Amino acid sequence: MNLSSKPRPSIFTITSLYIKKFKDKNFDITAETVEWGRERVVGFYTDLNTARKCVIEDWGAFEEAGYYNHIVIEKVVEGLYNIEGTMNKPNQWWFRFDGNERKWVECVIPNAVNHVINISVG
């Protein structure tokens, strides 16, 4: 096995998903959960700027009438498990759908997926 230090090829995946907010009766707080099975990789680009433009300009009508409310762009590198850059999630860019403005806006990583890496790869 050759583990050279040269950069490995990468792509930037775009995944739509639905994150549900609910009132947690036990703690009297608003919490979040992901409805797994309600996420889908919709495409990828070899350039982060193109992937971001695709989301911001909503090239894919990603919201699908409320079926999805978040999008994550992830840098995926060639190889197994895609472990490069998973600490502190520097290779994820998050967006939520703003229903009032009818557009995708950048956001912080939702609490519901703070522990999840490689959403697009699995």
Image (cartoon, grey):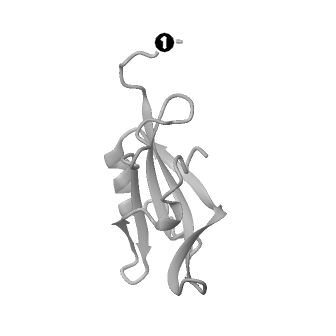
Q: Give the image location of residue 101, x and y in percent.
A: 36, 80
Q: Residue at x 45, y 16 (%)?
A: 3
**Judging from the image, what secondary structure is the residue with disc 1 in?**
loop
Report the front residue among 26 and 23.
Answer: 26
Residue 56's image quarter? Answer: bottom left
- Asked if 99 appears above or below 85 in the picture, the reply is below
Q: Residue at x 38, y 72 (%)?
A: 103
Furthest-top residue in view? Answer: 2
Report the front residue among 99 and 32.
Answer: 32
Q: Give the image location of residue 115, x and y in percent.
A: 51, 56
Q: Residue at x 36, y 19 (%)?
A: 5
Furthest-left residue in view? Answer: 49
Name the side, left or right, on which 47 lies relative to 44: left
State the residue position of label 1.
Answer: 2
Q: Is residue 99 visible?
A: yes
Number of callouts: 1
Q: Give the image location of residue 116, x and y in percent.
A: 53, 53
- Asked if 116 appears above or below 2 in the picture, the reply is below
Furthest-front residue in view? Answer: 26
Quarter of the image with the N terminus in it: top right
Report the front residue among 18 and 23.
Answer: 23
Name the side, left or right, on which 49 lies relative to 46: left
Q: Is residue 61 visible?
A: no
Residue 86's image quarter? Answer: top left
Label 1 Cα neighbours within 10 Å, binned few <14 / some 14-19 / many ≥20: few
Q: Give the image location of residue 97, x and y in percent.
A: 44, 72
Q: Residue at x 40, y 60 (%)?
A: 94
Give the amino acid at mark 1: Asn
